[in-house]
């Protein structure tokens, strides 16, 4: 190994050291552990583990969703991939320059995120797509470590109220410190590296089918985030 490669490997390891990842068989949340065990029996070909973030740790934007869908991210192992919500999220990222390639609902579709990373407030699939406050708090350590490890982070987009609260708690605020509102932005970081939080309604099928969230409303949130990133170099 050349000296340059050695230094690069060391830098990567140093960065990784800050990134706390749940064990593939994480049992911190008994209900989620139990559901995952059931799913392993029912769907042995699925990923069935805490779904890791997607995108570079050096990105300036972090998108935080709720939790993997049973037959989407929990099946494929990539956030929002194969989920109804991903059918809006990924094309929006491509349209706004935050991803390149073709989204084909599969982790091997070659899609690349550009200056963006996606994770979930809760890493494991919950029954009926509903997480408890305890599960969100328990998974919060992973979100905190993710945010801390993203040294270039400028903007976090929270998809829905649960993600909004999880991000605030991960940044050391009370869940109620800022009121969730679609399209709202808040300064949430400390000291010089001020981080902005941008809220959006979750891009779930339910929200798009009921008209609570339109593709245009979603585009606007991402276009504003891109402007915020550019203005915060
Ligand atoms: N899939 C995810 O990974 N997260 C969500 O919030 C919804 C679907």
Image: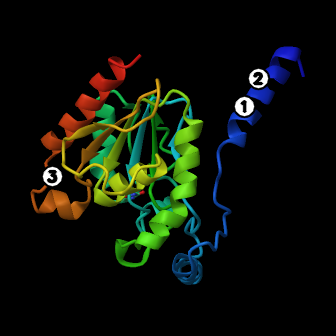
- Colouring scheme, one of rainbow, by chain, secondary structure, one colour: rainbow
- For the point 59% across and 66% down, which residue is it? 49
| Left-right relation of 114 to 95 | right
Nearer to the camera, 43 or 163? 163
| Left-right relation of 220 to 233 | left
Q: Earlier in the sequence, mark 3 or mark 1?
A: 1
Callout 2: few (<14), some (14-19), or many (20+) C-alpha neighbours within 10 Å? few
Disc 1 on helix, strand or loop?
A: helix
Callout 3: few (<14), some (14-19), or many (20+) C-alpha neighbours within 10 Å? some
Disc 3 on helix, strand or loop?
A: loop
Q: Position of residue 37 (x, y in %)?
A: 59, 81
Q: Quarter-wise, where is residue 127 in the image? A: bottom left
Q: Can you tell which mark lies on residue 213?
A: 3
- For the point 88% across and 16% down, which residue is it? 3
How far apart are the alpha carbons under marks 2 and 1?
A: 6 Å
Q: Earlier in the sequence, mark 2 or mark 3?
A: 2
How far apart are the alpha carbons under marks 2 and 3?
A: 43 Å
Are circles 2 and 1 on residues that touch, CB within 8 Å? yes
How far apart are the alpha carbons under marks 3 and 1?
A: 39 Å
Q: Position of residue 35 (x, y in %)?
A: 52, 80
Tag 2 residue: 8
- For the point 27% across and 35% down, which residue is it? 222
Please, which residue is most extreme toward the left here? Answer: 211
Are circles 2 and 3 on residues that touch, CB within 8 Å? no
Task: Locate the C terminus and report the quarter of the image it occupies.
Answer: top left
- Quadrant of ligand 1 in image: bottom left
Callout 1: few (<14), some (14-19), or many (20+) C-alpha neighbours within 10 Å? few
Q: Quarter-wise, where is residue 208 in the image? A: bottom left
Task: Give the vertical position of 146 relative to 195 (above or below).
Answer: below
Task: Give the vertical position of 79 relative to 45 (above or below).
Answer: above
Disc 2 on helix, strand or loop?
A: helix
Tag 1 residue: 12
């Amino acid at each position: 190994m050349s000296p340059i490669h050695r230094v690069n490997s060391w830098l990567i390891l140093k960065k990784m050291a800050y990134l706390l990842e749940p064990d593939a068989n994480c049992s911190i949340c008994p209900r989620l552990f139990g559901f995952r065990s059931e799913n392993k029996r029912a769907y042995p070909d699925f990923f069935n583990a805490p779904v890791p973030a997607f995108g570079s740790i050096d990105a300036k934007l972090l998108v935080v969703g709720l939790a993997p869908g049973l037959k989407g991210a929990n099946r494929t192992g990539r956030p929002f991939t194969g989920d109804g919500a991903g059918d809006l999220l990924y094309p929006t990222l491509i349209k706004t320059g935050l991803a390149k390639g073709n989204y084909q609902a599969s982790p091997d579709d070659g899609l690349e995120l550009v200056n963006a990373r996606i994770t979930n407030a809760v890493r494991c699939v919950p029954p009926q797509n509903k997480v408890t406050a305890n599960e969100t708090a328990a998974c919060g350590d992973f979100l905190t470590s993710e945010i801390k490890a993203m040294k270039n982070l400028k903007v976090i987009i929270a998809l829905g109220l649960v993600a909004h609260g999880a991000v605030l708690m991960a940044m050391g605020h009370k869940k109620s410190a800022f009121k969730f509102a679609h399209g709202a932005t808040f300064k949430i970081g400390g000291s010089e590296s001020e981080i902005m939080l941008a809220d959006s309604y979750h891009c779930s099928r339910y929200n798009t089918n009921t008209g609570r969230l339109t593709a245009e409303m979603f585009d606007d949130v991402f276009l504003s985030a891109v402007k915020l990133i550019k203005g915060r170099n």
